[in-house]
Structures are given as C-alpha cells and as structure tokens.
Image (tube, rainbow, N blue to C red):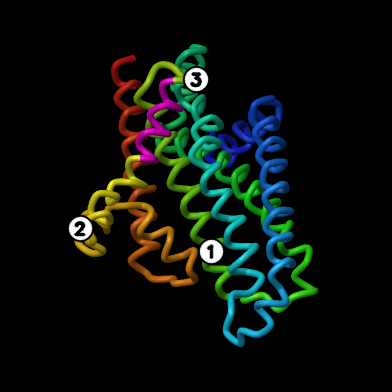
Amino acid sequence: MSLVAMFRLEVRRLRVQPLAWVLLALSLAWLGWGFTRLLGDFLAGEIKRAALPDGPGYVDLVAVPLLGQLAQLAFLVVPLLAMSTLAGERRNGTLPLLFAAGVPASRIVLGKYFALLLWLLLWLLLTLAMPLSLAHATTPDWGKLAAATLGIALMLAALTALTVAASAFTPHPALAAVLGLLIGLALWTVNLGAQMAGLNGGAINWLAMSTHEQNLLRGLVSTTDILWFVLLIAVCLALAARRLAADRERG
C-alpha cells in the first residue's frame, strides 16, 4: 500500500467518523460567536480609533484574536481528533493487518498524519473565512494575517504530531488524548515561571511553544520559530514510526 493509498484510507475514515463532524460543528459555532463579539467591539470603538493614525486595525482586533481563540480550542480538539490514529488501530486489532499487508511503519504514520492535518487545515480555512468575509470593507494588514495564519497552521501540525506519537505509545485512545493534551500544555507553559521572574530569554523560553507562536501571531516571521515547529514535528513522527516498527518486529 502506497502513502497516497494510506492517506486516502484515513481520509475516508475521518469522513465517516461522527466525532470529527461534531468537533468541527461545535468548534465553528463557538468561533462564530467569538467572531461576532470581536466584530461588535471593533465597530463600537471605531470612532475612537479614527483619532489614532497608527492605531490597531481590523486584523489586530478581529482576525488575530479569532485565530488565538482557535489556538486555545486546538489543545482540546486536536487530541480528541487524533487519539484513535494508532491506539484505535491497536485496540481494534487492525494494526497487524496493516503490517501483514507490508505497509512500512513510516508510511502508516505519515498517511494518518497528513489526513488529520488536511482536516485541521480545513478547520483553519473555515475559521479564516469569517474575518475574510468582511475584508473588502476594511484595509487589512495582509502580511500580519499571513504570519498569524502560518503560526496557527504550524501549531496545529505540531499538536497533531504530538498526539500521533502519544497514540503510538498507548493502548487506549483516551489515554493518548490525555497525553497529547498534557504534553501540549506543558510545552506551551514551560517558560511560565521564567516569565513571572522577568526572564524573557534563555533556553527555557526557546523551548516553549508559546514563545514561537506569539511571535508569529504578532506578525514576526523568523526561521528560528519555523524550524522549532518543524523539529518538533519531525521528532514526534520519528518516535511514532520507531514505536510501530518495534511493535511489528515483536509481532
């Protein structure tokens, strides 16, 4: 089975999975309510901002905060969506069938990962459609919006890789969801103590996901921030593939 075939198989599984559609509907409903509130606050303060030549605009007050709300939901949505990726196959006894078909462990992991990522990017695009629907009536900062969108996409990709790795090491999907949530939150808040002490640099801040994500949400795109996410994704997927390969060798 090729990587494309594995990808299509996982996409079909997501299409018939009720949980995926429930998560999509509930999260978009919540984000739609948040967009309405952000837009109301933006319109209410429009007269005051008119007197400020360099005041915050539509992207700063509506689009980026909405993406920030999506980032908060992602810590719950991504683990719930990805928890059955490998743990569910192991629980249902279908993982040995994939091994018997001669599918390499890396191909299984990547096929499932890219299918999940496609669903999450669709979620991101549907969220972006809300502020973009009024972009013609404003003068948005497209560069800042693009940087913020890139940051959210990288965060979704990293959280998905974390949960896929957790799913590879656990026998139950619920445990994989808990591990994905806890590890994601730990990576986000690992520098909280340093920030409270007034330390804004150093290795501990570099390790924190929040450091790199907040830079992108502010419109600051740097190679260091992008490489941090790419490195995390690569390590998690490599660990997941290594664990599946070990399971295959043990039979």
Comes first in the chain, label 3 or label 2: 3
Type of the residue with mark 1: Ala
Question: Which of the two marks, 3 or 1, is nearer to us in this view?
Answer: 1
| Vertical arrangement, residue 190 with respect to residue 219, above or below | above
Q: Is residue 90 magenta?
A: no
Residue positioned 58% across, 40% down in the render: 115
Name the main secondary structure of what is drawn in magenta.
helix
SS for callout 2: helix
User: Residue 24's x, y, as percent?
Assistant: 68, 37
Say which residue label 3 marks: 89
Task: Indicate which disc residue 203 carries.
Answer: 2
Of helix, strand and loop, which one carries label 3? helix
Mark drawn on residue 148: 1
The image position of residue 30, as x and y in percent, is 68, 42
- Seen from the viewer's position, the closer of residues 18 and 73 is 73
Q: Is residue 32 above or below residue 56?
A: above
Q: Residue at x 34, y 57 (%)?
A: 228
Closer to the camera in the image, 122 or 99? 122
Picture quarter containing residue 138?
A: bottom right
Instruction: Tell me: 233 left or right of 46.
Output: left
Q: Residues within 10 Å of mark 1 (few under 14, many from 20)?
A: many
Which stretch appears magenta? Answer: 175-185
